[in-house]
Amino acid sequence: MKTALIGATGNVGSRILAELLRRGHEVTGIARHPEKLPPQANLVAQRGDANDEDGLAGLLSGHDAVISAGRFVSVNPQTLIAALKKANVNRLLVVGGAGSLEVAQGVQLVDTPQFPAAAKHEALAGREFLNVLRSEQELDWTFLSPSRLFAPGERTGKFRLGTDQLLVGENGESKISLEDFAVALVDELETPRHSRQRFTVGY
């Protein structure tokens, strides 16, 4: 599959890139500093800005799907959606956040007192991004939220999937490695099971 990856040099973007290449996909890695991407087979590095609608549309044209791994405070969802439509690409997968997951009936993680203040701006932007997608009538989108603790770790390929509720393990922890998150996202790319839905992944 020919996939465009926005934010290919970031913490999660770099893991998704590695997973895509591991499985033989052709990838256009889009970043503000594409020189940070080491040359690899099946990878074309491109300089791009997620908020430049026309420029981004030109980069996305000809791809089967787009993965957005940029920070929500830096990506305007309306601009991204418009760029996909101009490029005639119908499939969008988004690296989501955990803040909009429910921890109790009607209570989202970002709205709890213990949610870290430093992460709140990004989490609220992620929630708004998801709301924009949910009102989108044309694109085939998917939004994958990680667990609460989302950090580098091992690629085990063993995890659980959920929908709108925060996943918590038997030990009381809610976590997923960047590497296993990438596995779950590329699984969804290859075998769509959550079209026009948000889902989540955790141990």
Image (spheres, rainbow, N blue to C red):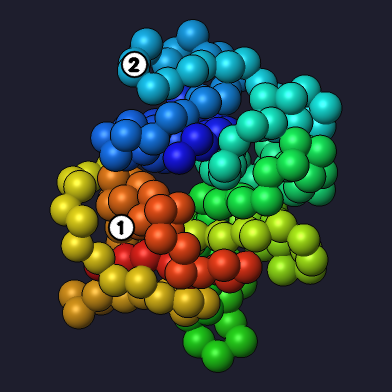
Q: Which residue is mark 2?
A: 40
Between 74 and 8, which is closer to the camera in this rendering? 8
Q: Quadrant of the N terminus?
A: top left
Query: What residue do we see at 41% from left, 53% from top?
Result: 190
Rendered image: mark on residue 176: 1
- Look at the numbered discs 2 and 1 and tell me whether their residues touch, using CB distance below 8 Å: no
User: Which residue type does callout 2 highlight?
Assistant: Gln
* Residue 64 visible in this rendered orientation of the protein: yes
Within-10-Å neighbours for mark 1: few <14, some 14–19, many 20+: many
Q: Residues within 10 Å of mark 2 (few under 14, many from 20)?
A: few
Kindly tell me whether residue 68 is visible in this rendering. Answer: no
- Please give left or right for residue 78 compared with residue 169 in the image: right
Residue 180 lies, in percent from the top left, at 28, 52
Q: Is residue 110 above or below residue 116?
A: below
Q: Amino acid at mark 1?
A: Ile
When asked about the image quadrant of residue 71, the answer is top right
Provide residue 200's location: percent of width, then percent of height: 44, 67
Q: Earlier in the sequence, mark 2 or mark 1?
A: 2
Q: Which mark is residue 19?
A: none
Q: Nearer the viewer, residue 118 or 152?
A: 152
The local secondary structure at tag 1 comes to: strand
Give the image location of residue 55, x and y in percent. 77, 23
Q: Residue at x 16, y 53 (%)?
A: 156
What residue lies at 51% left-to-right and 69% top-to-bottom? 194
Position in image of residue 54 (x %, y %): 83, 27
Q: Residue at x 65, y 60 (%)?
A: 140
Location of the C terminus by quadrant is: bottom left
Residue 158, compared with residue 64, is above or below; it is below
Q: Quadrant of residue 126?
A: bottom right
Q: Secondary structure at mark 2?
A: loop
Q: Is residue 1 left or right of residue 7?
A: left
